Amino acid sequence: MDHQTLVVTGGVDTHKATHVAAVVDPTGRLLATQSFPATPTGYTRMAAWMNSFGLVDRIGIEGTGSYGAGLARHFTNTGIRVVEVNRTNRQTRRAHGKNDTIDAVAAARAALSGQATTTPKTRDGIVESIRVIRIAFRSARDTRATIGIQIRDLIMCGPDELRVALEALTTSQQADKAARFRPGPITDPVEATRAALRSLARRYQTLTTEIGQLRTQLDQLTMQANPTLRAVHGVGIDVASILLIAAGDNPQRFTSDNAFAALCGAAPIEASSGNTTRHRLNRGGNRQANHALWRIALVRLSHDPRTKAYAQRRRTEGKTKKETVRCLKRHIAREIYHVLTNPNPTTIPNTSDLRPTRQQAGITLTTAAKALGTYPARLSDLERGTRHNPTLEHNYRTWLTNQTTT
């Protein structure tokens, strides 16, 4: 068989500066290995080198979410199938050792044998934009939380006059007041504390503004990426961004809702043996996505009548609250999977008429919220379409209708 008809499989062990590639024939026999720079030019040279051995059927790449992201995009754009390869297991490393060449060969053979079948994220669409904006958002949010703790501690351990003036205020109020301090010479511990509080408070305010801007961007991006997901009960900006990032720009890479649930750590793992049939809790998967499903479940347990009835039925069957939530997360994962892979815009409720109706009746948000036993912010989100709650929407619309007809 000549090089023109030989079908080969590639494997790559990726690193920051260089990538080590390997090529194997259909029987898994190693044909060659070579190192290439981790640059666009290196990607092109690697592709030409692999093609010199025959028709490249697929390539197994280790680290498609980090050092191998650019290489995976390059081969995907050239039409070659790329599969994500996990690092070699401990048994293999103990038996054969470990180096870059061994890892590259193992990646090629994993792709050839079908052991590695996962399609990596493409990272070339709007979800990638959401991912990078969310990194900045989380950084700003976490940093602000740390600064808030530092402000609290300085006040608690500081001079009495500062503690009396600021201790009873909220963190935002403390920051607003401290940002206007005009400290004297910092050789005095009281004035030095005031100077430190002013510095932290102004940083806190800057981050608060930045968080608001980034949250607005995430709101716009998630609505544009999948408005149907945003319409799901219990899904807000944060939860939507987490789930979209978990699925990637190509959610069709999941072959079933079982695969998506497994990614989210919401699918129980079989642990049967002999005559014993049982399953155990999945503690792996994407823990952020798992937490997002948990948040949806908690919202529905509090506000959705169907979910409350389901939870009650499960408890009568002997399930604990934790077990009931786990069952809920699995059902929610199935729902989210179908929304991600086959969004249906017709299922998005239209709430644009709520605010004009309320304003024409001369009703404030505070009055409406008090009558419905909720918060004004919840009704505002409902009116603007940024958060959806079918039960609250129905109650709100019914209440507005009654107010305008009486």
Image (spheres, helix red, strand yellow):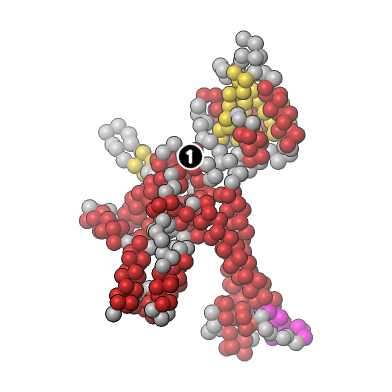
Crowd class of label 1 (few under 14; some 14 to 19; many from 20; radius 10 Å)? some
Asked whether 194 falls inside the magenta stretch, the response is yes
Q: Which SS class for mark 1?
A: helix
Give the side of residue 359 with respect to residue 60, left or right: left
Picture quarter with the N terminus: top right
Q: Quadrant of residue 291?
A: bottom left
Q: Please report the bounds of the magenta region as a residue range.
A: 185-198
Q: Amino acid at mark 1?
A: Gln
Picture quarter with the C terminus: bottom left
| Camera-nearest residue between 73 and 118 | 73
Q: Percent from the top left, x then y, of residue 83?
A: 56, 33
Helix, strand or loop for the magenta stretch, by majority: helix
Q: Label 1 belongs to which residue?
A: 252
Q: Percent from the top left, x then y, of residue 115?
A: 50, 29
Q: Residue at x 66, y 39 (%)?
A: 70
Q: Is residue 270 visible?
A: yes
